[in-house]
Amino acid sequence: LSQQQTLSHGAIGPGRYVCIAVSDAGRGMDEATLRRIFEPFFTTRSSGNGLGLATVREIVREHGGALNVRSTPNGGSRFEALLTCIAAVTPVPALRPPALPLGGGETVLMIEDDREQRLRDEEILAALGYEPVGFAREEDAIASHLMASKRFDAIVIGGLPPLKSALACAASLCKAASDRPILMATASVDEIDANALIAAGVSEIVRRPLVATEIAAALKRCLAARLTAVSTDAG
């Protein structure tokens, strides 16, 4: 491509790309359905969780690509994933990237006031093997946690300006269930005092918006530490 191109779901800049296309001759989709197919939990089926295409979009996006989908009712569908093409000057040995540490279905309580960001973060956690439960308001999250604290295995707090509110929320959740790891997602750690984090019960700091590799490793560490602590107490 010699210039930026806008696709149905994303945009790509100038450069060389490889296109992976999958098409069928099925019943197709109308415009309303086509606009929503990559939303987490959206599905037109009677069963299913609607996370398949959401996961596809996240993988393509993390590789610097975009998706182009064309479909008409009763006219089939065509999905195109465009990924950057990298030409190596000299042959290099094939290296297998380290596998992401995946969850085992643990439930993660999330607080994020930005709707689009919340949906994207839920998408990331679901793709990593967790069951995300997102809240826009800290009051709703705290109320839900107090009513069913055993339901949640970990907590991720993000998007609660000012910082004092986020720390107060973490402290309230920690008081309700001190054995649940609390992670705080923030765009900058410059203003955060370590003693304040410890006092609020925050286990780890991660970037906001969430990065799949970072949140995967952080959750795995926190949940493993929690299991170790529980085993030690039981012993």
Image (tube, grey):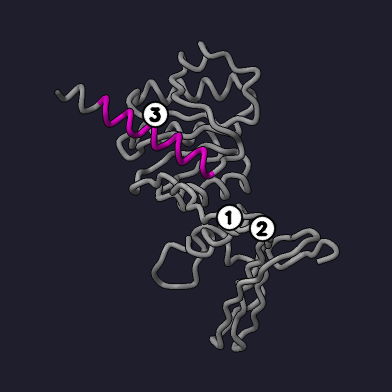
Picture layout, residue 16 above or below residue 201: below
Task: Quote the CA–CA distance across marks 2 and 1.
Answer: 8 Å
Q: Quadrant of residue 36?
A: bottom right
Q: Nearer the viewer, mark 2 or mark 3?
A: 2
Q: Name, please, the residue furthest toward the front.
A: 90
Q: Amino acid at mark 1?
A: Val
Q: Secondary structure at mark 3?
A: loop
The magenta-colored residue range is 212-229
Label placed on residue 92: 1
Q: Secondary structure at mark 1?
A: loop
Q: Which residue is mark 3?
A: 181
Picture layout, residue 131 above or below residue 194: below
Q: Amino acid at mark 2?
A: Ala
Mark 3 or mark 1: name the one nearer the start of the chain: 1
Does the stretch in magenta take in 218?
yes
Can you say which quadrant of the picture contains the C terminus? top left
Q: Which residue is mark 2?
A: 88
* Residue 77 or residue 175, whichever sits in front: 77
